[in-house]
Amino acid sequence: MTPSERASLRKSLRHRRRQLTPREQDAAASRLYDRVAGKRYFHCARRIAFYLPGDGEIDPGLLMAAALERGQLCYLPVIHPHKKNALLFVRFRSGDVLQTNRWGIYEPRLRTAALIPARALDLVFVPLVGFDAACNRLGMGKGFYDRTFAFRRRRHSPRLIGVAHECQSVPALEAQDWDIRMDRIVSDGKTYQPQ
Ligand SMILES: Nc1ncnc2c1ncn2[C@@H]1O[C@H](COP(=O)(O)OP(=O)(O)O)[C@@H](O)[C@H]1O
Ligand SMILES: [Mg+2]
């Protein structure tokens, strides 16, 4: 796949998920919750990173609410202020103030005391633009998660779960050298695990 083919694939998949109605989004979020909420990997995780959805992304908010309720430690990504196209993770508690970043995406305020090293997370819910059945992930095109979790090539933790609408599935994605594969992908319709 050439870079321009990847760019046009991203464009059409993003368009597709933005077309979902609020009702379809709510139904998808609740099906995602049902697929994950009872799983051991979710219950057993102490430190979990979520994200706040935008651009038609599936909403993992019900899972975050359940985790907060149970006293699991929850984190949200914040754009790294110094390192290009990398993420930091900041603790989020119910009622914390959110602000918009340069792309209009909500983030918690960056507080040094609330930061956690990415490798200290147990479980990360990763947003994506496209995926295939082998758990390859196509992101927004800036490599944020690939860079932030590049160390996962040499470690098993944290567990990376890509979450998406089923309409973001594609027959096959050609992984690039730097792409980090997901341990599992959960859509509103199906769960995928690499063979
Ligand atoms: N670990 C890394 N170190 C340096 N550059 C990286 C790393 N991971 C990704 N990149 C760069 O980020 C850019 C976007 O990556 P890509 O995989 O196309 O985006 P996405 O994962 O968001 O779809 C690429 O030019 C790639 O070289
Ligand atoms: Mg990538």
Image (cartoon, grey):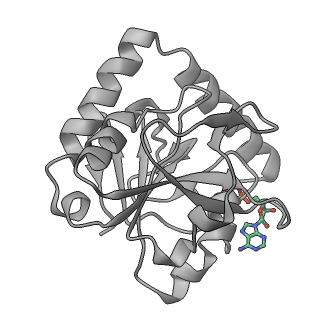
Residue 103 screen position, x and y as percent: 78, 35
Residue sitting farthest toward the bottom? 154
The residue sitting at 47% across, 77% down in the picture is 120
Image quarter hosting the C terminus: bottom left
Residue 127 screen position, x and y as percent: 52, 46
Of the pair 97 and 106, the residue shown nearer to us: 97
Q: Is residue 39 left or right of residue 120?
A: left
Q: Is residue 176 left or right of residue 123?
A: right
Residue 82 screen position, x and y as percent: 86, 65
Image quarter hosting the N terminus: bottom right
Residue 42 vs 122, above or below: the answer is: above
The residue sitting at 25% across, 44% down in the picture is 69
Of the pair 129 and 66, the residue shown nearer to us: 66
| Residue 175 visible | no
The residue sitting at 74% across, 36% down in the picture is 8
Of the pair 44 and 126, the residue shown nearer to us: 44
Q: Is residue 66 left or right of residue 95?
A: left
- The image quadrant of residue 5 is top right
The residue sitting at 59% across, 36% down in the picture is 97
- The image quadrant of residue 63 is top left
Residue 104 vs 142, above or below: the answer is: above
Residue 47 screen position, x and y as percent: 38, 65
Residue 111 vs 179, above or below: the answer is: above
How many numbered tags mark residues here?
0
| Residue 74 visible | yes
